Image (tube, rainbow, N blue to C red):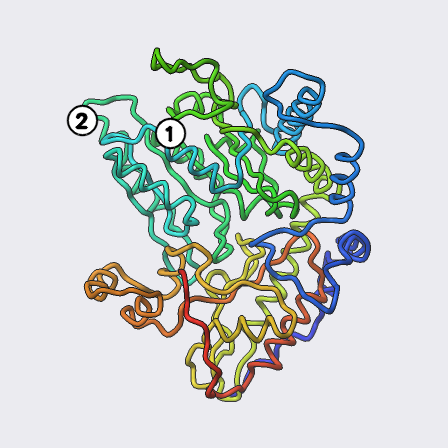
Amino acid sequence: MERPEPPRTSPTALPGYAATGRIDELRATEYRHLDTDGQVYLDYAGAGVAAQAQVRQHHDRLLAGLYSNPHSENPTSAAAGSLVDSARRAVLDFFHADPAEYAVVFTPNASGACRLVGEAYDFGRASPLVLTWDNHNSVNGIREYARASGGAVRYVPLSGPELRVAESDLTRVLDAGPRGLAGRWGRPGRRGLFAYPAQSNFSGVQHPLSWVELAHQHGYDVLLDAAAFAPTNRLDLSIVRPDFVCLSWYKLFGYPTGVGALLARRDALARLRRPWFAGGTIRAVSVQGDWHRSMDDESAFEDGTLNFLSIPDVEFGLRWLDSIGVDLVHTRVGLLTEWLLERLVTLRHDTGGPLVQVYGPTTGAARGATVTFNLRHPDGTLVDERLVAREAAAAGFSLRTGCFCNPGAGEGAFGIGRESLRRRLLARVDTIDQYLAALRLPTGGAVRVSFGLASTATDAERFVAFVQSTWLNREVGVEAALPPRLRC
């Protein structure tokens, strides 16, 4: 069989690439630490990278002023509170969110934002939860709150090799939701919650933002997981109006860690009922009287003392990203992703079999800069992702292997059906490797590379060269013992 010749063009020759040259300038200055010791960073879906300017700004701010707990009333407390308030305004400005419509709740991360919604949402027999298969586990976990409150949980499946959700399937599931249940149980006006990722952290698929309005028309509130989407795509909340948006700031610009946000429509936030209270969330409380009164604004959801020394870094990070241009970053990573996909899918062994099995879209249409795949031996068998991780690390590549906390997308990619899960897991399994053996899976996960703010053509070219030189025509061999899988 004659093998197709892979494209030899560098990404730098692609139309439009030269216009993104500012990123190369920044890579040589603000992000030059990425090139220390010949490393190649390809895990932007896991975490962004910080510019030197961000670290300098944090250092200079702390040495130039004195800040203390914003819950106090003194000059240092007022200074910290002023910076936190400024960061809230910066978040709303960045996402074009009307402060009369949206509030910003600072959280430890996107997972914390999801928990806030899950624990306080009014689930019940007439208020179901609908999720797409490819949600991150931080969103999947909301189903435990829904079930504990007697709410139905419905998943919308993925279909086809691109691992997308058919809008007809989504509409069918939404049609079975609050409207029908409200009539059945005589509870008009009840709502449900629809949660989905703007971009899958597994396949890179970007689901339509128009689904927010579609769900609203069916009587649902919408939780939009934007953690994987926002770093390289513009989210305009003056156009798309989800009720809840979950974010982790380190995904957008690397620093600070330990700070995320829940952006919530004020009317939706007012409908949440928290199951507990903590310091900073209440206006008044009595021990002997056994009562409490929550704060009336977003601070009712910010437990304890905020991370007041790092939250101001969010404002600087947003301004830094805005100065570079989200659209510019979007263009750069889109070009690199298209080039990488074209190269990977054309690599073939001398046997004619493909070297790379991509999960999700193999073109740049309606997808983000996250590419997930497995490598194949010349006989067609999958290469264990742990071996790829080990050899990639030894060669200086920072990438991700495993399931990426996205079991639904993994089940769709590997063709695992519900009946298979039920039938083969009746026997007791104690380890992840036993679980995989029971399902008769050839490996335990996949390989993921992702581009971001400071990615360059050299990063992509070096990775393709590594894959080709290391794995093309490499026969199955006796490999050194691989560590057991600890989670999936």
Residue found at x 19% / y 22%: 186
Q: Amino acid at mark 2?
A: Trp
Q: Is residue 192 above or below residue 25?
A: above
Alpha carbon separation for disc pair 1 and 2 = 22 Å
Image coords of residue 148 (percent x, y):
26, 37
Q: Is residue 459 above or below residue 327?
A: below
Residue found at x 50% / y 65%: 401
Q: Secondary structure at mark 1?
A: helix
Q: Is residue 371 left or right of residue 336?
A: left
Q: Is residue 217 left or right of residue 201?
A: left
Location of residue 14 (image quadrant): bottom right
Judge by depth and name the residue closer to the eye, 233 or 318: 318
Q: Which mark is residue 120?
A: 1
- For label 2, the residue is 185
Image coords of residue 42 (percent x, y):
62, 61
Q: Amino acid at mark 1?
A: Ala
Q: Which mark is residue 216?
A: none
Location of residue 461 (image quadrant): bottom right
Residue found at x 27% / y 35%: 177
Judge by depth and name the residue closer to the eye, 77 or 164: 77
Q: Are marks 1 and 2 in contact (CB under 8 Å)?
A: no
The numbered mark, 1 or 2, whose residue comes first in the sequence reads: 1
